[in-house]
Amino acid sequence: MQINKEQLISELLSLTERAIISVKKFKTLDITQLNFKNTPEQWSVLECIEHLNLYGDFYLPEMQKQLLETTHKGNFPFFKPGIIGNYFAGLMKTKNGKIKKMKSPKDKNPVSSVLSITTLDRFLKQAQLLQSLLQQALTADLTKIKTAISLSKFIKLRLGDTLRFYAYHIERHILQAEKAMGS
Amino acid sequence: MASELQFINKLINSFSEIGEMKIIAKGDYLIKEGEIEKNLYWVESGAVRVFYLTEFEEHVIRLGYKNSFINSLSSFIKETPSEFFIEAIRKTTIKVISKEQLQMLVHENTDSLKQYLALMEILVTQQIDREIDLLITSPAERLKRVLARSPNLFQEIPLKYIASYLRMKPETLSRIRNS
């Protein structure tokens, strides 16, 4: 299976832009709405976004590092997903606006973190960094470049898969946050 | 009395006379990144932190507690968007004067101007001291320098914010203090 890289980057950039627009909308809400939880187990808007920030803390420096240090640069119009990477990306992708329920790793659990309005600002800065990385990815070999993952020291993903997994993960939780806003 | 101290006294008196009193709750912001700073604040009680937000961290760059002036200085001077947030870390009482009120004070007479200039010179040297703060490799020495300037720091500010200001982990700061 081969993916057209330009199309992929374009798709992920649009996704990121939509996330930015959503979070800018969240910034207009007041703090009680942002902290509102439908039930104790369901995450508030801020908890959803902080969860994304925690992932960004690991993945953004990692992707940035690999893009900076790689020699695999040039014109590579296609990206070939890896087996594990493709699986993870598929796991994250939302289908028809529906999110399949999934348990989060313990260290990425945002519940009872200190959350404030800066949670949203931090996400917006991370999103800008992601956009910059996606631009850089246009001239990199996303099949050859590998990144670590947060779950295990022994698994490496192809950068193209990391970007897909990471961006789709954002899309999932933004959707979750929009639902958490309540009425 | 040193020039800058005369101006500071004049300023403190002004805050008493014309400053508007405000009480801010813990977690409230005096200013957020992107807003334009129009005021100078005098902290009467409580404490605030000034921080710079990156993708990954909130970096505390200044702390303001009882009897100090604080604001987002660059934004105040240039009238451009603030790079910093200023947040109350506990319930805080402040006095507020506007930039216009400050300007009137500064331009009252030539003495005021001279004193204000002396104050600005001191501020510049404090900025340079702060630059050196950040370059010193020994965490213990960084702590020592800051304590020399602000001996009451630990009574006024929670450890985690002092650690951020000193650019070290809270665990490291605890360890240094206990040794």
Image (spheres, rainbow, N blue to C red):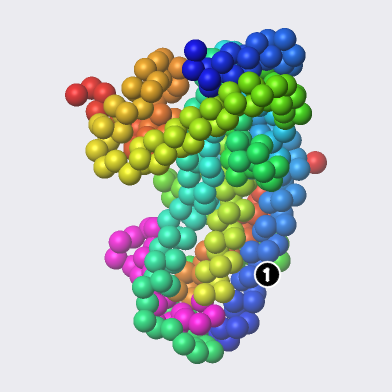
**Which residue is at 30% across, 61% downward?**
A153
Viewer-nearest residue: B66 or A49: B66
Q: Residues within 10 Å of mark 1 (few under 14, many from 20)?
A: few
Q: Chain of mark 1?
A: A
**Which residue is at 53% across, 27% downward?**
B118
The quadrant holding residue B134 is top left
As helix, strand or loop, the secondary structure at mark 1 comes to helix
The quadrant holding residue A69 is bottom left
B46 with respect to A72 (left or right): right
Q: Amino acid at mark 1?
A: Ser
**Which residue is at 45% across, 17% downward?**
B156
**Image position of B174 with respect to A156: above or below:** above
Viewer-nearest residue: B165 or A116: B165
Is residue A113 in sight in this rendering? no
Disc 1: which residue = A14
Residue at the outermost left position: B179
Q: Which x, y percent locates residue B98?
A: 74, 26
Q: Which x, y percent locates residue A96?
A: 71, 66
**Image position of B57 with respect to B162: above or below:** below
The quadrant holding residue A126 is bottom right
Viewer-nearest residue: A29 or A168: A29
* Magenta span: A137-158
Viewer-nearest residue: B134 or A31: B134
Is residue B134 in sight in this rendering? yes
Residue at the outermost right position: A183
